[in-house]
Image: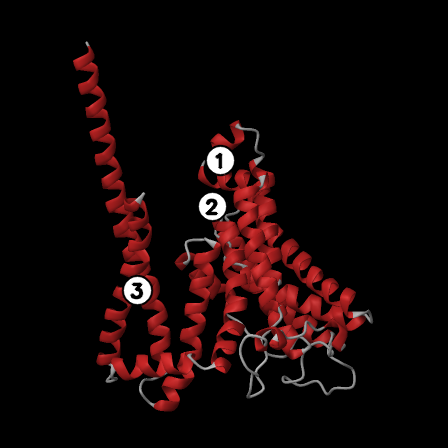
């Protein structure tokens, strides 16, 4: 038991140590003092307003990671999360502008619309895979381009408010009524801390993201569908022999992945109140890195999302204090992934070797006991 816990803790601890060493070397190479840089980053993160920013940044990253992880569990590489969340974002925003409902109905309708839209868009890749044998990597790359440069670009102009002049900065949907916007949860946080200053607002989508993480964990560990999903990803032939329909599981996994992806844009929608001319992009690809670093585990992905968000938010303070350039943050994120891959690889190899040795010793013990009995 102790050895198993040691193996579980060894990889993240080794990755953390390796990250510190390599990041420090990178800072020195770029002419920065590692101690000053890390001190500024930690000091900045200790402020409540910064912590709110970190949580706001981590929320869409976590949702993106869960969306990617659902595909990974099925041995599917869904790199179309980017297009799926943007497509779900604009459709949900437009639906929100067309409705006048009480908040208790308006908000869920918008969230469900985003999930269904993102899920159906992702399911296209699943259908292409099971009917035509198209690899999901290729199809999701193409669907990303179709969504971003095709459908969304066309809909932005079509759904622009009539009273606004058609310009690059006014493209987007009309503002949504306040009843359709998820409120912030500042009041919940301020019960245990103090008043959040500087106009900071902690997104209500944080609670949704927590709910998604819990649902993801229960789906994989407590439900038959989750078991079939994992079994199909590990060994589709054995799963088929056990009565699992692999083609249906592929489409279902892609739909679920896209449904979670559809929620990513709801973080910005709650803040902007509309689909803007220049929505935040890149979250889909960042989520893949967060999922890989978190080993597709809900807790691991939460930690990874917070780490990436911390590094993103730290870019500003490093630039303002001039202790390092903001580009060093991107380098650090790459170092984190590299260190994790190396640490997990070494730990896995050592663990496999230890298990093989333990098995050999157990077999030798059984053979010795058998000879003595005879």
Q: Residues within 10 Å of mark 3 (few under 14, many from 20)?
A: some
Q: Report whether residue 316 is seen.
A: yes
Query: Where on the picture, by quarter, is residue 95?
Result: bottom right
Q: Tell me which numbered mark, 1 or 3, is placed earlier along the sequence.
A: 3
Where 143 sits versus 192, above or below? above
Of mark 2 and mark 3, the one earlier in the sequence is: 3
Q: Secondary structure at mark 2?
A: loop
Secondary element at image label 3: helix
Q: Which residue is mark 2?
A: 75
- Where residue 218 appears, x then y in whole percent? 56, 48
Q: Quick check: 186 left or right of 309?
A: right
State the residue lying farthest toward the top.
374
Kindly identify which residue carries mark 1.
236
Q: In 3D space, how far apart are the residues under numbered discs 2 and 1 (Cα atoms)?
A: 10 Å
Give the residue at the far bottom of this rendering: 321
Can residue 125 be seen from the camera position used here? no
The quadrant the C terminus occupies is: top left
Residue count near mark 2 (Cα–Cα under 10 Å), binned few <14, some 14–19, many ≥20: some
Which one is in front, 122 or 201? 201
Task: Indicate the secondary structure of the residue bearing disc 1.
Answer: helix
Residue identified by numbered label 3: 16
């Amino acid at each position: 038991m102790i050895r198993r816990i040691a193996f579980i803790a060894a990889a993240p601890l080794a990755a953390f140590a390796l990250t510190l060493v390599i990041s420090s070397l990178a800072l020195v190479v770029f002419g920065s003092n590692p101690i000053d840089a890390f001190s500024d980053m930690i000091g900045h993160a200790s402020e409540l307003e910064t912590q709110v920013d970190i949580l706001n940044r981590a929320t869409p990253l976590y949702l993106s990671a869960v969306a990617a992880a659902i595909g990974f569990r099925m041995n599917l590489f869904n790199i179309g999360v980017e297009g799926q969340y943007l497509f779900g974002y604009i459709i949900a925003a437009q639906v929100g502008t067309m409705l006048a409902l009480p908040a208790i109905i308006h908000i869920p309708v918008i969230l469900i619309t985003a999930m269904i839209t993102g899920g159906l868009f992702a399911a296209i890749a699943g259908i292409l895979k099971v009917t035509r044998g198209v690899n999901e990597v290729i199809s999701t790359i193409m669907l990303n381009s179709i969504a971003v440069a095709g459908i969304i670009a066309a809909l932005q102009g079509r759904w622009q408010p009539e009273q606004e002049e058609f310009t690059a900065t006014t493209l987007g949907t009309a503002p949504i009524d306040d009843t359709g916007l998820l409120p912030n949860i500042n009041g919940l946080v301020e019960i245990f801390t103090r008043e959040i200053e500087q106009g900071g607002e902690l997104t209500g989508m944080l609670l949704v993201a927590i709910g998604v993480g819990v649902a993801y964990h229960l789906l994989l560990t407590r439900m038959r569908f989750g078991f079939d999903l994992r079994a199909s990803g590990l060994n589709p032939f054995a799963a088929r022999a056990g009565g699992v329909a692999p083609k249906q599981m592929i489409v279902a996994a892609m739909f679920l992945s896209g449904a979670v992806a559809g929620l990513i844009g709801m973080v910005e929608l709650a803040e902007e109140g509309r689909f803007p001319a220049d929505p935040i992009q890149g979250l889909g690809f960042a989520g893949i890195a967060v999922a890989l670093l978190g080993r597709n585990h809900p807790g691991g992905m939460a930690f990874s999302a917070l780490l990436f968000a911390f590094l993103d938010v730290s870019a500003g303070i490093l630039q303002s204090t001039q202790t390092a350039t903001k580009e060093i943050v991107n380098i650090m994120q790459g170092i984190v992934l590299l260190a994790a891959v190396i640490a997990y690889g070494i730990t896995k190899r050592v663990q496999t070797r230890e298990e093989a040795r333990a098995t050999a010793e157990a077999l030798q013990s059984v053979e010795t006991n058998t000879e003595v009995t005879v």
